[in-house]
Amino acid sequence: MPHDIDHLVAARPGNESSIVIVGAGQAGLSTAEKLRANGFVGSITLVGEEPDAPYQRPPLSKAYLLGELERARLKLKAEDWYARNRIALRLGTRVASIDRARRRVCLADGAILAYDCLVLATGAIARKLPQAISRGLAGIFTIRTLADIDALRPALEKRGKLLVIGGGYIGLEIAAVARGLGMTVDVVEAAERPLARVASAETAASVEALHRSRGVTFHVGKAVSELLGADRVAGARLGDGTIIAADVVVAGIGGMPETALAAGAGLAIDNGIAVDAYGRSDDPFIWAAGDCANFSLSGGGLRMESVGNAIDSADLVARNIMGARQPYRPKPWFWSDQFDLKLQIAGLSRPGDTVVVRQGAGPGRSHWYYREGRLVAVDGLNAPRDYLVGKRFLAASASPDPVLVADPMQALEAPANN
């Protein structure tokens, strides 16, 4: 990045400063909250394109879709919290452009918001099927927002046949919900296994086996060439000619960082909004946090889509706006609920890591990943204690003996907190 660390302090906002945050998701809200917690007393405006106040996204594809969680309980903060913390909400509002020279954002309704610091927390958007495949048919859904789930729920309540395109976390969570409702479920995954881009082969094999045992049919190493039907989807043709009947199709083919606004303003884009280790873009007055931000770190660029990253990167950006001068030290953690499986992941594994399996007393197990003798990640599959212990080891940059990890009769003790 062209600016240096000394500029971070020089640009620290004063008491009369205005901070505009674009994106009213977890990262945007966390940035606003942490700015207040770190002593910022100027004005904060949180702009969100969705009409709803900031809400939890993880329950959308699980408890909320099943009707087990009320809409009101999705809210991240009570309604009066924003007024008490002097955070102005502009919801149902799209930002049309950023005027970097005048330091202001232009809203689609013609309003102008001036800023001393701008934080982009625009998140990610769901990938859509190409028009050549979807053909504009009704009954095809993507999963990202509250509105997406509200649209999908009535379709699933009719039962019938569901086709999930994409075997990532979202696709498999929807598959589990649909099977629980009694639907016939097919999952098509172009890679050679589900979760190919987001989980180890060992963890993916366990998850796939669970789904198969519950009646989910997988078509791996195959792609959808065409969706069938007149006005509404009735099925799919795969590349090998296989025909799958379907009343509902969910496209769970991943997400893309939402960078259109940043790119339109001329900011550097590299698998997200390119920011330095402190969260600042190549404009010294513009920062980014959450799913849309690609941090430049010593090991290369890092962009993650997770609640943990949204919270942690927002905390970092808020502290650095206030002059902390702290680089991002990510502590990745993720989770997914499918059927009766709670999958919890800490750290980042990659192909080639040595995998040590620790079998629990019951059906639970954990996978421990070592790289050059150092623990780098832990996956807990209905093994919450193993996950918590492993997370503590990772936080302490400590590595338990793999021989002890592999022996379920040996108790694992987490390092003491410093």
Image (cartoon, helix red, strand yellow):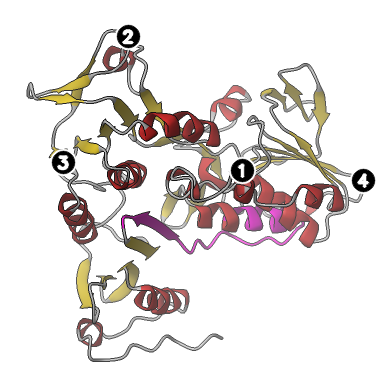
Q: Quadrant of residue 127?
A: top left
Q: Residue 54's spot in the image, x, y percent?
A: 65, 44
Q: Which of the two discs, 4 and 3, labels the residue nearer the N terminus?
A: 4
Gap in Å between the C-alphas at discs 3 and 2? Answer: 26 Å
Of badges 3 and 2, nearer the viewer stands 2
Asked whether 58 or 403 is in front, the reply is 58
Q: Which residue is mark 4?
A: 16
Q: Amino acid at mark 2?
A: Asp
Q: Secondary structure at mark 4?
A: loop
Q: CA distance from mark 1 to mark 4?
A: 25 Å
Q: Which residues are magenta?
A: 313-339
Residue 282 location in percent, x, y? 62, 38
Q: Earlier in the sequence, mark 1 or mark 4?
A: 4
321 in the magenta segment: yes
- x and y percent of residue 175 in the render? 29, 43
Amino acid type, mark 3: Phe
Return the residue found at the far top. 230
- Which corner quadrant holds the C terminus? bottom right
Question: Disc 4 or disc 2, which is closer to the eye?
Answer: 2
* Tag 4 and tag 3, C-beta contact below 8 Å: no
Residue 80 percent coordinates (x, y):
81, 50
| Residue identifier under label 2 | 231
In three-dimensional space, the C-alpha distance between marks 1 and 3, rounded to whole angstroms, equals 33 Å
The residue beneath circle 1 is 25
